[in-house]
Image (cartoon, rainbow, N blue to C red):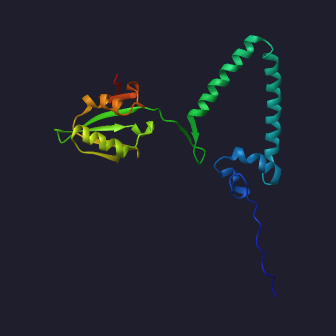
Amino acid sequence: MAEKPQPVKVLYCTICSLPAEYCEFGPDFEKCKPWLIKNALELYPNLLKEANEKEAEKVSEQLQSAGISSSADGAASSAQPGNTSSSKQEEVKRLPGGKIKKKEKQEVVIEKVVRNRRKCITIVKGLDLFGIKLSDASKKLGKKFATGASVVKGPTEKEQIDVQGDISYDIVEYITETWPAVPETAIFFIEDGKKVPAA
């Protein structure tokens, strides 16, 4: 009689939850490397060499920085690049697949679009970045200017407020009065394809 086939035991990475053979194709292979060196070195024999090289580089950098930081000027110059890199790390956000997404600037963009030669639509983008609910904002804008206002998804798949009519002349003052969290310096118009500050 033939023996029953036994199930295959698969080693899963605790970091990315993929099988160890597929870690290199996962979202962040760099985070998985220490775990792979410890648990699945036979699958990635080059990782140990890379880890040793990196440790040697770190030690040499520490020795160099210790020699440089003994002078007061060197300490001041080494402190400045560290501050800039930490601020850049705050602006950058990692997405699955290793993609990098930058934080959006908090700004309100107002654009006037003409359709059918006469009709105008004023588009307000970016109010949600200030913590304002777009549905409430569209109701207030519609009541204030006695027009139709709705929340729609724009061409970039981000929600924006479409207000019927050309209200760009009064909208800046109304936004700054109604929502004090939005400063006038953060409001911009788009005129002839160029971003122009409202202030």
Q: Is residue 95 left or right of residue 161?
A: right
Q: Quadrant of residue 78?
A: top right
- Asked if residue 154 can be seen in this view, the reply is no
Kindly identify the residue that appears in the image at 30 percent across and 31 percent down: 174
Viewer-side residue, 127 vs 110: 127
Kindly identify the residue that appears in the image at 29 percent across and 39 percent down: 141
Query: Where is residue 81 drawn, in percent x and y?
Result: 66, 22
Query: Where is residue 61 drawn, in percent x and y?
Result: 79, 26
Q: Quadrant of residue 166?
A: top left
Residue 23 vertical placement versus 181 (above, below):
below
- Count of numbered circles on the image: 0
Q: Is residue 126 left or right of residue 112?
A: right
Q: Is residue 78 left or right of residue 55?
A: left
Residue 61 vertical placement versus 149 (above, below):
above
- Asked if residue 11 can be seen in this view, the reply is yes
Q: Quadrant of residue 134?
A: top left
Residue 154 vertical placement versus 173 (above, below):
below
Query: Where is residue 68 drawn, in percent x and y?
Result: 78, 16
Q: The N terminus appears in which quarter of the rendering?
A: bottom right
Extreme residue in the bottom direction: 1
Viewer-side residue, 33 vs 47: 33
Extreme residue in the left direction: 118
Kindly identify the residue that appears in the image at 81 percent across and 48 percent down: 37
Viewer-side residue, 140 vs 5: 140
Kindly identify the residue that appears in the image at 69 percent across and 16 percent down: 77
Q: The C terminus appears in which quarter of the rendering?
A: top left
Query: Where is residue 11 drawn, in percent x and y?
Result: 76, 60
